[in-house]
Image (cartoon, grey):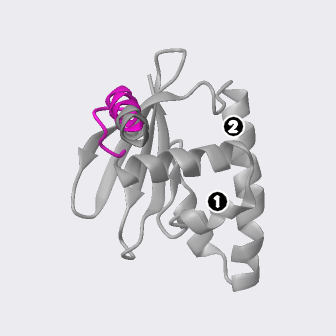
Amino acid sequence: MMRKLVGLLQCLCLVVGLLQGCGDPPDPDIYFAEKTTYMLIGGDPGAADRLDWDTLQFMGTNQGAQFMALPSEGEKIGFKNPFINSVSAAFQAMKLDVNSLNNWRISTKGTWQTVVIADTPTQSKVLVTVSRRTGQPLISAINRVT
């Protein structure tokens, strides 16, 4: 009886693995880009630790330059939460939420950065760049292309 149960569980795991892309785990950069984007959409202040503030580009604007131009650490800290709230508002204005972004995949992958793409319902794409300039994954750019 126990063997039959174990065999059934193994078959079930195999089927689930096949349904999830032959059992391969998703690329960690895809997961990181998707999770961080969802955090930003939700206005989660925890996203601040996942952004490369020094080089950050958002929808064609060099936020990193604005951040680096701030003269004090206090001003830099004060920049982060309002920025995250404005990103959340921008996604809402584009009518994008966690349910409308899908088909996350890698566009390009190099030693120091990976560009991840997600589709939107309007046939545009959201491009999220995961960089490893500091040795750890951080989001350095989020852009939308049509």
**Main SS, magenta residues:** helix
x and y percent of residue 45 in the render? Answer: 74, 60
Considering every residue shown, the one lying at the far top of the view is 122
State the residue position of label 1: 47
Rendered image: mark on residue 85: none
Q: Quadrant of residue 9?
A: top left
Q: Residue at x 25, y 44 (%)?
A: 108
Foreground residue among 87 and 14: 14
Mark 1 vs mark 2: give the one in front. Answer: 1
User: On the picture, is 43 further left or further right than 33?
Assistant: right
User: On the picture, is 43 further left or further right than 59?
Assistant: right
Q: Quadrant of residue 81?
A: bottom right
Q: Within 10 angstroms of label 1, few (less than 14), some, or many (20 or more) residues? A: many
In the displayed structure, 77 sits above or below 124; it is: below
The reply to whether the C-beta atoms of the residues labelled 1 and 2 are less than 8 Å apart is: no
The stretch of residues the image draws in magenta is 9-26
Q: Residue at x 57, y 52 (%)?
A: 36
